Image (cartoon, rainbow, N blue to C red):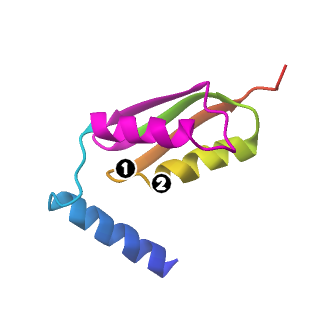
């Protein structure tokens, strides 16, 4: 837990210094690429919005596992400061 805190602290500190700052347009492009190319995730109905590095995921997925996978994938995108996950689970028809 402490290591995770320190990692996030230094990541944010670097972003504020401008070393890893990304524009919202760059972040949204990277997030969409990651989600669309994850072989274990159907991101067809996931919508992505980014404001000041805060990523909001909305739309539908087929399971709670898919919700978790989407959020985990986005965590690793450079420039993401926070993730708001508002995905709904819709059964497969």
Q: Label 1, label 2: how many angstroms apart (C-alpha)?
A: 7 Å
Q: Please tell me which of labels 1 and 2 falls first in the chain.
A: 2
Q: Quadrant of residue 19?
A: bottom left
Q: How many marks?
A: 2
Q: Horizontally, is 27 left or right of 67 in the view?
A: left
Q: Is residue 34 magenta?
A: yes
Residue 34 location in percent, x, y? 50, 43
**Residue for point 59% across, 44% down:** 70
Q: What numbered label is drawn on residue 75?
A: 2
Res. 22 mark: none
For label 1, the residue is 80
Query: Residue 72's spot in the image, x, y percent?
Result: 57, 53
**Label 2: how many residues lie within 10 Å, few (<14), some (14-19) or many (20+)?**
some
Along the line of sight, the residue nearer the viewer: 59 or 30: 30
Q: Are marks 1 and 2 in contact (CB under 8 Å)?
A: yes
Q: Residue 11 at x, y = what percent?
A: 31, 66
Vertical side of 37 occupied by 16: above or below: below
Look at the image and give the residue range highlighted in magenta. Answer: 25-54
Quarter of the figure with the C terminus: top right
């Amino acid at each position: 837990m402490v290591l995770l805190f320190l990692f996030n602290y230094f990541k944010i500190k670097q972003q504020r210094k401008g070393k890893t700052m990304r524009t919202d347009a760059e972040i949204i492009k990277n997030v969409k690429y990651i989600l669309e190319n994850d072989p274990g995730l159907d991101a067809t109905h996931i919508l992505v919005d980014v404001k000041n590095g805060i990523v909001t995921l909305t739309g539908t997925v087929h399971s709670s596992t898919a919700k978790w996978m989407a959020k985990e994938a986005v965590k690793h995108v450079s420039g993401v400061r926070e993730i708001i996950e508002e995905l709904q689970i819709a059964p497969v028809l």
